[in-house]
Amino acid sequence: MNVDDLSERAGCPEHQLHHLHGSVFDVKCTKCSFQASGAPAEHVLLMKLLCSTREKENLQNRDTKRHPLFISGEDIPRCPTSDCDGLIRLAIVWFTESIPQPLLASIHQWICPSDQSMTIDTMLVIGTSALVYPATAYIEAARRKGARVVVVHIEKEDPSLLGLEEQDWYFQGDAVVLMPEMLRPVIGS
């Protein structure tokens, strides 16, 4: 799942979304367990990320191409928790960072619920090659539930590297163009 909120804006029910890589609209502390989403995150960012008054006044007179914005050490966002001086950062998963285990467990339960009779018709893999764990594991779990896999990716990939089988599909191209055409019979124009 992407770190933007495009799925939410497109009307996807939030209870069906699992943000594997976090969200740019959430913040967390680098030291303690502080996290904020929505309006509280916006408040933290607005209060903590705005540069000093001196810098704000200078912004109007600055040639940003020649003199990029300087943020001093005192302007780096800090945790609002009273006993913590950790840095505030976006709550997204960077390369080499682990996806939180509770989130992985939640997704696994969603794909492989205790009700063994549940099947999956189709799994859409859009905008990624899905060559990295845990995405590859989700494809295999869905396949065990009967899913046919549809991959839509802008880059040319070798379908055999994706573990695609004869009943699966691979479409190379821009998902913005391909997905509306593919889903037209289901959702209309």
Image: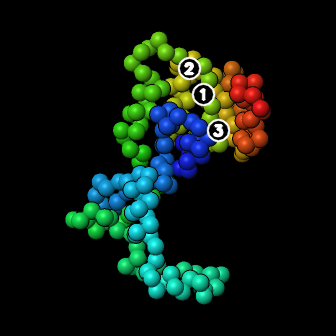
| Residue under numbered circle 1 | 123
Residue at left 60%, top 19%?
121
User: For the residue marked with disc 2, what is the amino acid?
Assistant: Ile
State the SS at label 2.
loop
Residue at left 44%, top 14%?
116
Please identify the quadrant where the N terminus is shown.
top right
Q: Quadrant of residue 125?
A: top right
| Residue under numbered circle 2 | 120
User: For the residue marked with disc 3, what is the amino acid?
Assistant: Ile
Contact check, label 3 and label 2, Cβ < 8 Å: no
Residue at left 50%, top 32%?
16
Q: Quadrant of residue 100?
A: top left
User: Residue 162: x percent and y percent?
Assistant: 63, 34
Q: Residues within 10 Å of mark 3 (few under 14, many from 20)?
A: some
User: In the rendered view, would you say 26 is above or below 87?
Assistant: above
State the SS at label 3.
strand
Contact check, label 3 and label 1, Cβ < 8 Å: no
Contact check, label 2 and label 1, Cβ < 8 Å: yes
The answer to which of 123 and 169 lies nearer the viewer is: 123
The answer to which of 78 and 189 lies nearer the viewer is: 189
Q: CA distance from mark 3 to mark 2?
A: 17 Å
User: Residue 131: x percent and y percent?
Assistant: 58, 40
User: In the rendered view, would you say 5 is above or below 183?
Assistant: below
User: In the rendered view, would you say 153 is above or below 46?
Assistant: above
Q: Residues within 10 Å of mark 2 (few under 14, many from 20)?
A: some
Which disc, if any, is residue 126? 3
User: For the residue marked with disc 1, what is the amino acid?
Assistant: Met
Please identify the quadrant where the C terminus is shown.
top right
Q: CA distance from mark 3 to mark 1?
A: 10 Å
Q: Quadrant of residue 129?
A: top right
37 left or right, relative to 126: left
State the SS at label 1.
strand
